[in-house]
Image: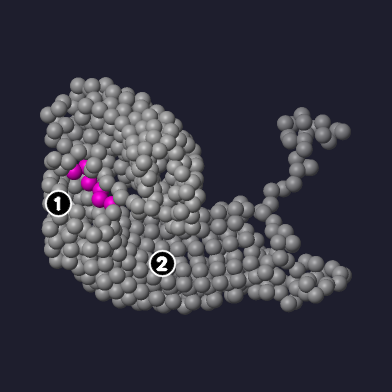
Amino acid sequence: MSRFGKAKANNVDSLAGFRAQKKDTVISHGVLNAARKSGQLNLSSRGLSEVPQNVYRLNIDPPEDAHQNVSFDASDRWWEQTDLTKLLLSSNQLTHLSDDIRLLAGLNILDLHDNQLSSLPSALGELQELHQLRLSHNQLTSLPEELCTLKNLRSLTIQQNLLESLPEQVGHLENLSELDLSRNHLKGLPSSLGCLIGLQKLNLCHNKLTCLPDSLRQLKNVKMLDCSNNQLTHIPASLSEMVALEQLYLRHNKLCLLPRLSAPTLKELYVGNNQIEQLETEQLECLTAISILELRDNKLKTIPEQITSLSTLTRLDLTNNDITTLLASLSLLPNLKVLLLEGNPLRGIRRDLLTVGDTNTEHTHEKQADQIPNELFDAAAGEDVTTANFSKNQMTSIPSRLVEFHASLSDINLGFNRLTCCSPDICKLLNLKHIDLRNNQLDELPPEMKNLTKLCSIILNYNRFRFFPEVLYHIVTLETVLLGNNQVSAVDPNRLMKLDHLSTLDLSNNDLLNIPPELGLCTNLRCLILDGNPFRTPRAAILAKGTDAVLEYLRSRITT
């Protein structure tokens, strides 16, 4: 008793002697033994600060049971163990990887994503059987040259790190089919990248690239190339030699011209948010297989007649340009289903027609019905339905059976109905990119809508919203929000600023008594519509000058 009494008197934790000392996470013998049999070990999300030594030595040391005087049946013969081929260490707190990783020479898959690694050991180059290496979401500033000796590597994902350059030897990864370098700090690329002749997917988005190496022309098997969110001022014509290219993403760069690419298989070209002022005949004539052409958020004033030669075009996005006249001959495009024109100073065309989305007729229903018959859903069962048009009916609720197409549905039109609430069921359609809910009786949106992480545009014109919908502040992928002709009385510019992709915001004909000057800091906005509100400033003369003038005026009124 005296021992405990003394401890208490000195303010010492009297139970310290009974508490176990903090140890690193221990991997149970049962887990390790199972890995010896299956060749797979999953240690993800275990709070590991380092890889336990017995993991590295899994195929070298006998299991602890072998030291005991026990008999083994046929299923427990540790000496007949399988080499470890798959090791998952993601979502831990690893700050380093030991050179002992070389002891796992049979690894095919090594997953280290979502840790705190700032460097990699050179011993990684000894894992010559490695097919897949996942390093995303770490703090890597460089890659060891030895990593480039992994001749059997097929997939290398290093997105969301701190890389400023790549080793020239990266071209030695001759069997690589997927390379993801997105969201790093790359300012240039080694010319040896062109040696990766097996590459099919190359992601370079969200870096600091000002040009692309001419050697990319050698990548004859690349189907998808993403160079979005860089600082590119031009695209080399030699990219036309990438004869397998189907998808090219060039959004958010500094391009002044549409790239002249005669890639024969190019189906999707995304050049939104650049500085393109005109389209040339030669540029359009090259796009012989194009299906989707995105030109939104540029400075186009006219569309040349030659665009009507794009007979394969199904979707044309011209949102937020300076187009004043619409070509009547666009109606001659035989396969055009979606034409987006919102945010242009078009004359002689109603604003509610500026966003036009056609759909497959078998999934369109316009019969003034109060509910959609089951026969329509039954007929579409088993199909990859991407668009659904239930506009101009009398529906008071969203059809519950829409969730049956959650895997494919990306575009839904429920405008011109009698919806009084938006069912949370719509939030299960996780692939949705476009929602049209105009001309209904909605006054709020479900908070579950924040799960729609691919949503680009939402049309809410002519409803009963009194406030800017709270959930929209949380959908960071939004590019277009149309909220005109409601009763919105306030908007929070500080939260709008966090919507990095928001370029079109329509708040016309609402109840805004004042426009906060901080709204001028939302510099991503290319189209801001404020007409028809009861505020006094900015005055109509400033509104008439366009979005840039309005934003500049608002910034000038910010008190410092």
Q: Is residue 260 visible?
A: yes
Question: From which residue to which does the magenta span run?
Answer: 338-344
Residue 409: x %, y % from top left: 42, 51
Image quadrant occupied by the N terminus: top right
Residue 159: x %, y % from top left: 42, 59
Quadrant hosting residue 346: top left
The residue labelled by disc 1 is: 328
Q: Nearer the viewer, residue 125 or 369?
A: 369
- The three-letter amino acid code for the residue at tag 2 is Leu
Q: Residue at x 15, y 48 (%)?
A: 326
The residue labelled by disc 2 is: 179
437 to 293, vertically: above or below: above
Q: Residue at x 28, y 23 (%)?
A: 511
Q: Residue at x 31, y 42 (%)?
A: 480
**Which label lies toward us, 2 or 1?**
1
Query: Which mark, by number, is residue 266?
Result: none
Quadrant hosting residue 166: bottom left
* 154 relative to 466 in the view: left or right: right
Q: Residue at x 47, y 49 (%)?
A: 375
- The three-letter amino acid code for the residue at tag 1 is Ala
Q: Which SS class for mark 1?
A: helix
Q: How is the image coloured?
A: one colour
Q: Earlier in the sequence, mark 2 or mark 1?
A: 2
The Cα atoms of the two marked residues, 2 and 1, are separated by 43 Å
- Disc 2 residue crowd, few under 14, some 14–19, many 20+, Cα 10 Å: some
Q: Nearer the viewer, residue 68 or 509?
A: 509
Residue 317: x %, y % from top left: 25, 51
Q: Which SS class for mark 2?
A: strand
